[in-house]
Structure formats: C-alpha cells, structure tokens
Image (tube, rainbow, N blue to C red):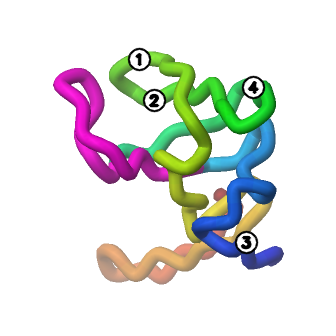
Amino acid sequence: MTQLDSDDVENIKEGTYVYWMDESDDIPRGSLGEVTGVDGEERSVKFAEKAIFVKATKLNVSDFQKDSFVHSTRGSDDLMGSW
C-alpha cells in the first residue's frame, strides 16, 4: 500500500479519494469523495451529495486509496478485502 501525504496537493490526482476540509451547505465537512478531474490547482470531486469543482487546498487525501487492503473486525468473523 502506498501512503500519500494527506496535505500535498501534488498527490491529489484523478482517481484519488479525498476528504472535504471546507464548510458547505451541500457537503458536510469531512465527506469522502473521488477526484474525477484535475485542472491546475483545482479539482473536480464527486461526493455522495453532488460533484463540485474546488481548489485542491480545500481537500485532504484519504488514508485509504483504491487497491488498499482493509481489515474489518465488525461481527464475529474477521474479514480482509480490497478497498
């Protein structure tokens, strides 16, 4: 698993999972989204609530990215899978 520096905007590329670090009436702070496009310092991000175009400095890279392994201990059976 590759660990990305959470506040380095150079790491916020298309396909990266990010957290919304700003305030919005439509998107709660801390919401998880996926970057769908890059244009200079701005990113197009798809959140569950809606897609927005925002400066990369308003985002933080998620600890988990595609192809990361995750371990769930919820319930009686331990599960391991791919994120």
The residue depicted at 78 percent of the width and 26 percent of the height is 39
Circle 3 — which element? loop
Q: Earlier in the sequence, mark 1 or mark 3?
A: 3
Query: Does the magenta segment cover residue 19?
Result: yes
Q: Along the line of sight, which residue is nearer the eye, 11 or 64? A: 11
What's the distance in space between the residues labelled 1 and 4, CA to CA?
14 Å
Circle 2 — which element? strand
Q: Earlier in the sequence, mark 2 or mark 4?
A: 4
Q: Which residue is mark 2?
A: 47
Horizontal side of 49 relative to 65 (left or right) equals: left
What's the distance in space between the residues labelled 3 and 4, CA to CA?
18 Å
Say which amino acid is labelled 1: Lys
Circle 4 — which element? strand
Q: Which residue is mark 3?
A: 4
Residue 15 lies, in percent from the top left, at 76, 40
Query: Does the magenta segment cover residue 11?
Result: no
Using a 10 Å C-alpha cutoff, classify the residue at mark 1 as few (fewer than 14 neighbours), some (14 to 19) or many (20 or more). Answer: few
Q: Quadrant of residue 27?
A: top left
Q: Are the residues at dot 2 and dot 1 in contact (C-beta closer than 8 Å)?
A: yes
Say which amino acid is labelled 4: Gly
Q: Earlier in the sequence, mark 3 or mark 4?
A: 3
What's the distance in space between the residues labelled 2 and 1, CA to CA?
5 Å
Horizontal side of 13 relative to 57 (left or right) equals: right
Q: Which contiguous range is marked in magenta? A: 18-30
Using a 10 Å C-alpha cutoff, classify the residue at mark 3 as few (fewer than 14 neighbours), some (14 to 19) or many (20 or more). Answer: some
Residue 67 lies, in percent from the top left, at 79, 59
Residue 47 lies, in percent from the top left, at 45, 29
Using a 10 Å C-alpha cutoff, classify the residue at mark 4 as few (fewer than 14 neighbours), some (14 to 19) or many (20 or more). Answer: some
Which numbered marker is on residue 50? 1
Circle 1 — which element? loop
What's the distance in space between the residues labelled 2 and 4, CA to CA?
13 Å
Q: Which residue is mark 4?
A: 37
